[in-house]
């Protein structure tokens, strides 16, 4: 059976950016965070952060986590301008969020390996 071609409106209105819960209790956070599928412009930020096997800025782990962390409706909690507040949180906790975000988004595992070096 051949499916009908999608229209512009159908594509733009498709709910393709789901969120997945991640229990952060073991890191002392006392609950879950939602980790979301990145939008195209957010995925480009990830690509810009990580080139030729090397992180391009020192606080990239916090920025990566800020891109992944969402509310229940899938909206980012941390903006581009306030992600640095996350850099004061546990590196283990941020790494766990990044690992899960990489899994949810199907991003290359080399990003996680780089985060573990920093």
Image: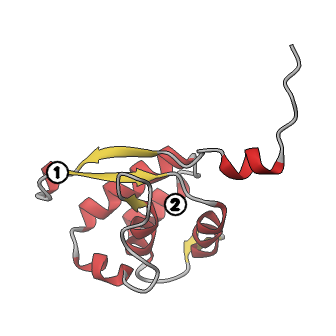
Q: Give the image location of residue 117, x and y in percent.
A: 39, 67
Q: Which residue is found at the position 35% from the left and 51% from the top?
A: 72
Q: Give the image location of residue 107, x and y in percent.
A: 58, 51
Mark 2, secondary structure of its residue: helix
> Is 115 placed left or right of 48 in the picture?
left
The total number of labels drawn is: 2
Q: Give the image location of residue 22, x and y in percent.
A: 30, 46
| Residue 53 in sight here | no
Mark 1 = which residue?
A: 31
Mark 2 = which residue?
A: 111
Outermost residue, front direction? 9
Which picture quadrant has residue 2? top right
Q: Which is more foreground, mark 2 or mark 1? A: 1
- Taking depth in this image into account, of 103 and 78 the one nearest to the observer is 78
Upstream in the sequence, badge 2 or badge 1? 1
Q: How is the image coloured?
A: secondary structure
Quadrant where the image shows the N terminus:
top right
- Taking depth in this image into account, of 97 and 114 the one nearest to the observer is 97
**Crowding near pointer 1: few (<14 within 10 Å), some, many (20+)?**
few
- Taking depth in this image into account, of 95 and 2 the one nearest to the observer is 2
Q: Is residue 94 above or below residue 104?
A: below
Quadrant where the image shows the C terminus:
bottom left
> Is 39 placed left or right of 7 in the picture?
left
Q: Give the image location of residue 27, x and y in percent.
A: 15, 56
- Taking depth in this image into account, of 84 and 52 the one nearest to the observer is 84
Q: Which residue is found at the position 40% from the left and 69% from the top?
A: 66
Mark 1, secondary structure of its residue: loop
Q: Is residue 9 above or below residue 47?
A: above
């Amino acid at each position: 059976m051949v499916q009908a071609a999608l229209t512009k409106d159908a594509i733009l209105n498709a709910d393709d950016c789901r969120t997945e819960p991640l229990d952060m209790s073991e890191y002392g956070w006392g609950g879950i965070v939602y980790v979301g599928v990145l939008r195209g412009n957010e995925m480009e930020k990830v690509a810009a952060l990580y080139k030729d096997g090397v992180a391009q800025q020192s606080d990239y782990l916090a920025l990566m986590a800020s891109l992944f962390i969402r509310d229940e409706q899938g909206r980012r909690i941390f903006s581009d301008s306030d992600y640095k507040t996350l850099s004061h949180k546990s590196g283990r906790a941020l790494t766990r969020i990044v690992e899960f975000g990489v899994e949810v988004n199907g991003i290359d595992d080399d990003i996680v390996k780089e985060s573990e070096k920093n």
